[in-house]
Image (tube, rainbow, N blue to C red):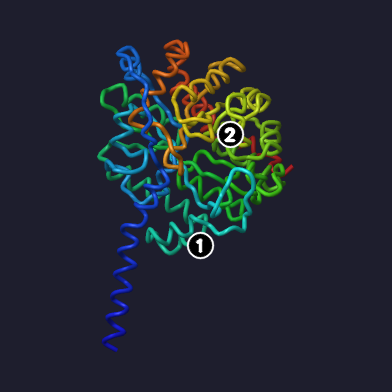
Amino acid sequence: MRKLGWALLIAYALFVGAALYVPGWVERGQNRIDGKPLLAVSEEAEALHQTLTIVDLHADTLLWKRPLNQAAERGQVDLPRLERGNVALQVFSSVTKSPHGLNYDRNSADSDDDITRLAIGQLQPVRTWQSLLQRTLWHGQKLDRAVAASHGGLRKVASVRDLDTLIALRARMPGPVGALLSVEGLHDLEGKAGNLDRLYDAGVRMAGLTHFFDNELAGSMHGEKKGGLTRFGRQIVRTMEAKGMIVDIAHCSHACVAQVLAMARRPVVSSHGGVQATCKINRNLTDEEIRGVARTGGVIGVGYWDAAICDTSPRAAAKAMRHVRDLVGIQYVALGSDFDGSVTTRFDTSQLVQVTQALMDEGFTPDDIRAVMGGNAIRVLRGGLVPMPELGQGAAR
């Protein structure tokens, strides 16, 4: 019995040790800075950057086991780095399922799930080990705890009033950083429309319909069938619009994108990605899709990783933004970093002045840069967060 007791104690110690150190080791291999040369930043760009209201539409930081409020030696986003980068509002996404060995071309919804491994390995509550809904609710609680522990440095944004309060507070330097909760793929509804209310109550105000696989709502650009919206998906889109939850088409199949844009009554966003005109990768938007997002009054968030812009240079991001500007207008361009989303980038959020400099180098005016770096996203949030119950009528049609 004594030997068994020692064996159990050693096994427990090894399990706890792995839970303490393995998640950090995993993240270091997933969210990386490539170390390639950065742009020389001019005094003009630095001065302009400090006057901007910056909004990033997508980061996956809540997925990882590290305190959001503390400076970290890994990853790409934390509160100190958001402050150094002069970020006014960060949209934090809840990632709840990711196929093992995922790729951009074809993934099965039945593949082994890496997020399950992460939930167990990070010693998250047992309820999150099997339930996708509980993973998002846990991420919402994690964000709420970070806000409560930030001593006013981080403020949750869940309404237009919250947004306006944040902007007013930031007029007094230094101001807080806003945090808005989103979801990367509504498979966390677990097939139940009523669970959208639970997400809303947890603070979710933006949601992508799909992620790397087809689900009950729609086909994914990376799924097996890549189909369009289902009846359930159409119902959820209408309900989201009515509740004041912004519809995100990132990762949707081309058929799904076309159908969402055709039925949209409120601004639609593509929170993170690129454009096929400058980087011909299947997940990026075609010119017709860019025009469709613009017709809804939405925005296209351009990211900084290779699969979005075919490079990690801020100049490549600026060229994608310039294409959107030239095609449909400056008012439809935004930032969508995908920081901490298992991506390799040239810079982290503390170095967003790199984007400001790249936009200046591409000939964007100061007013253009203000719009791209946050003004356009603020407009869409103001227009999309107000509940409009009448839009939910006939949701299932």
Q: Nearer the viewer, residue 42 or 204?
A: 42
Query: Which residue is the site of mark 1?
Result: 130
Question: As displayed, is residue 53 above or below residue 104?
Answer: above
N-terminal-most mark, 2 or 1: 1
Residue at horizontal 61 percent and vertical 34 percent from the top: 281
Q: How many marks?
A: 2
Q: Secondary structure at mark 2?
A: loop
Residue at horizontal 55 percent and vertical 35 percent from the top: 246
Q: Which mark is residue 155?
A: none
Q: Residues within 10 Å of mark 2 (few under 14, many from 20)?
A: some
Residue at horizontal 66 percent and vertical 35 percent from the top: 257
Q: Quadrant of the N terminus?
A: bottom left
Question: As displayed, is residue 341 above or below residue 9?
Answer: above
Residue 320: % across, % down? 54, 23
Question: As displayed, is residue 65 above or below residue 72?
Answer: below
Check disc 1 and give the amino acid type: Gln
Q: Quadrant of the C terminus?
A: top right
Residue at horizontal 49 percent and vertical 25 percent from the top: 317
Question: As displayed, is residue 14 above or below residue 156?
Answer: below
Residue 265: % across, % down? 65, 30
Q: Nearer the viewer, residue 348 or 231?
A: 348
Q: Nearer the viewer, residue 197 or 186?
A: 186
Residue 292: % across, % down? 66, 26
Query: Which residue is the site of mark 2?
Result: 388
In this view, the residue farthest toward the right is: 397
**Quarter-wise, where is residue 170 in the image?**
top left
Check disc 2 and give the amino acid type: Met
In space, the residues marked 2 and 1 are separated at their CA atoms by 34 Å
Residue 128: % across, % down? 46, 59
Q: Is residue 162 visible?
A: no
